[in-house]
Amino acid sequence: MSQVDILRGLANVPESFAETGTVVTIGVFDGVHRGHQLLISQAVAAARELGVPCVVMTFDPHPVTIFAPEHAPAALMPLDERARHIAELGVDDLLVIDFREELAGMSPEDYVTEVLAGLLHAKRVVVGENFTFGRDAAGTASTMAQLGSAAGIEVDVVQLLADGGVRVCSTAIREQLSGGDVHAATEFMGRHFSVIAPIERGAGRGGKELGYPTANQYAPETSAVPADGVYAGWLTIIDGATAGPIDGDMEPGMRYPAAISVGTNPTFGDARRSVESFVLDRDADLYGRLARVEFVGKVRDMVKFTSVDELLDNMARDVETTREILGVV
């Protein structure tokens, strides 16, 4: 798997950049969707052309959580997942900035001269056409081009990617998820949307009472989750390197088909919103393991049933629909 050096804060920028120079691209890159992939890939190509490291400068937490927490967007993926997908694009270094400590009050001019030119020794900067930077987001892509030219930095402004007349962006993906359209989210992201969280003990009804044992996850409230409903997808245990083998007939790192329920279990009156995965044709003890659940297609909306028998009939149909969507027998 591709690796990227993670640099936390400007104080950890290596001195070697002064000798080599860099190509830099900047953004939150939440979801690392197709638009992000286009931007980062152009930066990587420019870095290879110049024979210098490619640096992605990103932010954690999201700057909006600091300036306007009431408007903070739900995160499409945690930082470590962002780093993994960014590394896959060939980036050499990921510079992670905490806005609470750095850059927040910096003018656009100082941003370019002190950080990009002075510290990162950027030879080229690649940004999207909607890019803003500096105090009060006063700088734009055009500002970057002007200031970069004065500092001896070449600036590439990349046109935003659109699909079917809709701009590919993290906001659109969040809207697709809130409407339960995981297929559209997949199209925009270039991969299935996923939830990563440890598997916890739930109410115990799935296995003991209903015959459908589930792996229950509770994503942070700050994370994006698809709308309540039942989905077809894949579950992968991803902590094999640290937690070892699984007790049962599953292996870490393998993707297994699953019928996934998102919501609060209205039939039983549960209040806590969860992601519950019934892994098809497997029997394993997954409690305490870290899992990635990928959402492929929607099976149905969440419904409150009048009886357990009605629920069981629908669960059986959900499993069959899941098999059809995933193409498994």
Image: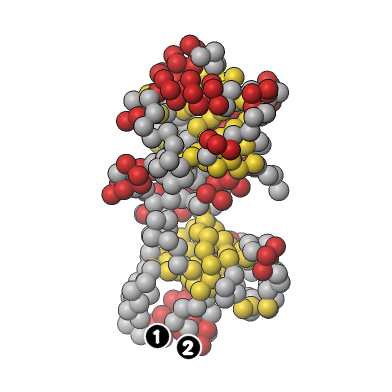
Is residue 36 visible to us here?
A: no
Closest to the observer, 113 or 272: 113
Closest to the observer, 168 or 150: 150
Q: Quadrant of residue 139?
A: top left
**Does 262 sit left or right of 153 as displayed?**
left
Q: Distance between the residues labelled 1 and 2?
A: 10 Å
In the image as oriented, which residue stretches furthest toward the bottom? 209
Hey, what amino acid is under mark 1? Val
Q: Which residue is drawn at 67% across and 69% down?
A: 243
Per the rendering, the mark at residue 125 is none
The earlier-in-sequence mark between 1 and 2 is 2
Horizontal and vertical percent for residue 154? 55, 16
Hey, what amino acid is under mark 2? Glu
State yes or no: discs 1 and 2 in contact (Cβ < 8 Å). yes
Q: Quadrant of the C terminus?
A: bottom right
User: Which residue lies under the disc numbered 1?
Assistant: 308
